[in-house]
């Protein structure tokens, strides 16, 4: 049931029917893993920061922001799915836990303190449960802008000024695939008011800067491993076209890792309207956002995202900011315990299952809805609430619609595994029983 008020680190918020943030999520806020000494996220952050000399760093921006900061200031349309209560943690209709570090772009541009900045912070998303997803994770936002007036003062074109800076980025000899043109009129358009040669120069600076980061991380990871074969494998990276409401053109960088292309960051040329609205219309530049856990998992070979939250010395004791990174040695893997739950979704006529008796009408709705207001993220959240970090993975194993009644049945398989010890049978059974009960109580499903 929604509370009237919540206080987080001395700040009080009045909740309303949009409130969907459990106390377990709020209790993660003080952890600030990315600033804990010798934490792998801190070391990863510092390694990346060291590749951006002169950029101003911000590591303590408060995670509760307005929907204006998180969405509107960045040009998210009113019906964007990212705004949905199934995807985002709200305290009230206009207050959210930031879903990305981009929430601070406009305010940081407005301060106009430096040409470049890096913002590292905890971010919050309702999402699936598996070894690479956790509802709290960490991002680094980076941006670099140039003042058009400086080019004028120096008697150069803006593009020339930027290319001079491109030449200052360390060179690398890694194979980069980048098959698409910088600008594509339909898929990845140039912004009004930006000249093509300016965008080419900014894109080159962005791409070279981020390639430098990935190469530095990869080299550190390679020296961290004792596995000769792994240290021989060449780094392969590629740029792919992307879309974000707040950049154009936009790209993602992917790294080939253990047989798959892994997305490590999103980036692009900052929408001029953001800079204009922030009172710096004479500036143009790029921005990126990367996931620190992903990078740290690559760097150290950390196999499960839950480990970052561990306070076990067998985990934390393996990382040191003052020594070269060493590959993580997993402590013994405790047994997995799989349990299934099958249920009928409430009939179509019943009210939405999104938690709470009368959820507010969300304009956004959701794309992943599978029946009568049902959203898988609600199943995930109940699993987290009941099991904490003991749940490793929840996946849909079966789904069908009854041919006569039209009712939808779902089956989920839960993997219960403690990271630090063996779970007893009784413990796993208790957790599963509570999970089943909560599914009925909170989502109104009928167990099969
Ligand atoms: N905020 C985006 C995300 O979380 C990443 C991004 C940042 C993309 C900055 C472009 C520019 O996915």
Image: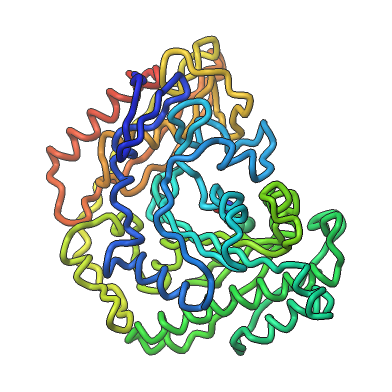
Residue 378 at what x, y percent from top left? 42, 31
- Which residue sits at x=76%, y=78%? 161
Display coloring: rainbow
**Looking at this view, is 99 or 115 the one in front?**
115
Q: Is residue 347 left or right of residue 32?
A: right
Residue 303 at what x, y percent from top left? 34, 64
Residue 422 at what x, y percent from top left? 14, 53
Residue 40 at what x, y percent from top left? 32, 68
Measured along the vertical axis of the image, is residue 31 above or below residue 37?
above
**Looking at this view, is 248 or 279 the one in front?**
279
Quadrant assignment, res 192: bottom right
Q: Residue furthest front?
A: 153
Q: Is residue 310 left or right of residue 112?
A: left
Q: Is residue 384 visible?
A: no
Quarter of the picture containing the N terminus is top left
Q: Is residue 2 left or right of residue 108?
A: left
């Amino acid at each position: 049931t929604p509370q009237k008020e919540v206080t987080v680190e001395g700040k009080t918020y009045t909740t309303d029917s949009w409130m969907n943030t459990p106390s377990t999520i709020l209790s993660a806020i003080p952890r600030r893993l990315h600033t804990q000494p010798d934490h792998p996220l801190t070391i990863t952050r510092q390694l990346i920061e060291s590749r951006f000399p002169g950029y101003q760093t911000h590591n303590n921006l408060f995670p509760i922001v307005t929907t204006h900061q998180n969405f509107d200031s960045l040009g998210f349309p009113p019906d964007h799915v990212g705004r949905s209560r199934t995807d985002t943690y709200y305290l009230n209709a206009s207050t959210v836990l930031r879903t990305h570090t981009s929430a601070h772009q406009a305010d940081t541009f407005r301060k106009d303190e430096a040409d470049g900045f890096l913002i590292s912070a905890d971010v919050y998303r309702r999402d699936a449960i598996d070894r690479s997803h956790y509802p709290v994770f960490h991002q680094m936002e980076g941006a670099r802008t140039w003042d058009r007036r400086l080019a004028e003062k120096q008697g150069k074109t803006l593009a020339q000024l930027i290319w001079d800076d491109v030449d200052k980025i360390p060179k690398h000899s890694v194979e980069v695939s980048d098959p698409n043109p910088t600008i594509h009129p339909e898929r990845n358009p140039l912004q009004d008011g930006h000249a093509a040669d300016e965008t080419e120069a900014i894109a080159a600076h962005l791409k070279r800067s981020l390639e430098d980061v990935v190469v530095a991380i990869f080299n550190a990871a390679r020296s961290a491993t004792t596995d000769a074969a792994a240290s021989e494998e060449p780094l392969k990276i590629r740029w792919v076209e992307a879309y974000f409401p707040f950049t154009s053109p936009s790209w993602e960088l992917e790294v080939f890792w253990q047989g798959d292309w892994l997305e490590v960051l999103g980036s692009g040329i900052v929408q001029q309207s953001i800079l204009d609205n922030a009172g710096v219309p004479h500036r143009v530049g790029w921005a990126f956002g990367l996931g620190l856990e992903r990078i740290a998992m690559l760097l150290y070979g950390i196999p499960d995202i839950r480990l970052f939250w561990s306070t076990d010395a067998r985990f934390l004791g393996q990382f040191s900011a003052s020594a070269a990174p060493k590959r993580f040695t997993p402590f013994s893997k405790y047994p997995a315990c799989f349990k299934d739950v099958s249920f009928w979704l409430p009939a179509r006529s019943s009210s939405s299952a999104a938690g709470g008796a009368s959820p507010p009408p969300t304009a956004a709705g959701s794309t992943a809805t599978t029946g009568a207001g049902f959203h898988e993220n609600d199943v995930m959240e109940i699993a987290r609430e009941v099991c904490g970090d003991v749940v490793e993975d929840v996946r849909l194993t079966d789904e069908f619609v009854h041919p006569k009644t039209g009712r939808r049945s779902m089956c989920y398989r839960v993997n219960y595994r403690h990271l630090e010890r063996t779970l007893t049978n009784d413990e796993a059974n208790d957790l599963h029983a509570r999970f089943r009960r909560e599914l009925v109580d909170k989502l109104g499903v009928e167990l099969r």
